[in-house]
Image (tube, grey):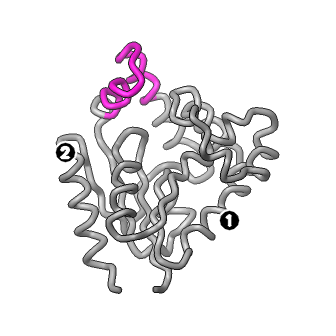
Amino acid sequence: MAAFTVAIDGPAAAGKGTIGRVVAARFGFQHLDTGLLYRAVGAKGGDPVSSARSLTAEDLSRSDLRSMEAGQAASRVALIPEVRAALVEFQRRFARAEGGAVLDGRDIGTVICPEAEVKLYVTASPEVRAHRRWLEVGGSEAQVLAEVRERDARDMGRADAPLRAAADAVVIDTSAMTIDAAVERACSVIAARFRI
């Protein structure tokens, strides 16, 4: 089968990772949570550019990559153009793998894979996303909301590859959707464009 790329973008805790994993399994595609690349670079410490250039598959399997600290570190190192450049080629090679690929992140449909066969933008209100994240990590829900808003401002305001929906992306707002409904919506969009 020829390469078939599904690009899923959106802010933190909107559901894009969950949707990406289920969609990949359903269609038999490989899946890459590209945020893990940035989380792994941030978690490695040291010089972020060197860390990005030497990133390995083992670095992506660290148990601490889902923490709020790793997420904040990822957002900071993602501001560095040399880090982004070091990870772009890795992502593009993955995207065009035989058998199809799903990549979820912040700039997949706009920068990494503007030629993707399907582009989805998964979003939800900051309050809903903060509540979801708070259920995962605990602590102060007000603090989690403040961190979500801070991260949104950083991700959407950065000069290099800001978070935004691609012009031809299908927007899925999960604020009032169950995960099953969001997955079905994504699968219907993909199925309409995917021909074996």
Residue 56 among those drawn in magenta: no
The type of residue carrying mark 1 is Glu
Of residue 24 and residue 140, the one placed in the foreground of this image is 24
Of residue 92 and residue 25, the one placed in the foreground of this image is 25
Q: Secondary structure at mark 2?
A: loop
Residue at image point 31% right, 71% down: 190
Gap between marks 1 and 2, in whole Å? 34 Å
Q: Residues within 10 Å of mark 2 (few under 14, many from 20)?
A: few
Which residue is disc 2 drawn over? 178
The boundaries of the magenta stretch are 129-149
Residue at image point 23% right, 68% down: 188
Prevailing secondary structure of the magenta residues:
helix
Which residue is disc 1 drawn over? 89
Marks 1, 2: nearer the viewer:
2
The type of residue carrying mark 2 is Thr
Quadrant housing residue 185: bottom left
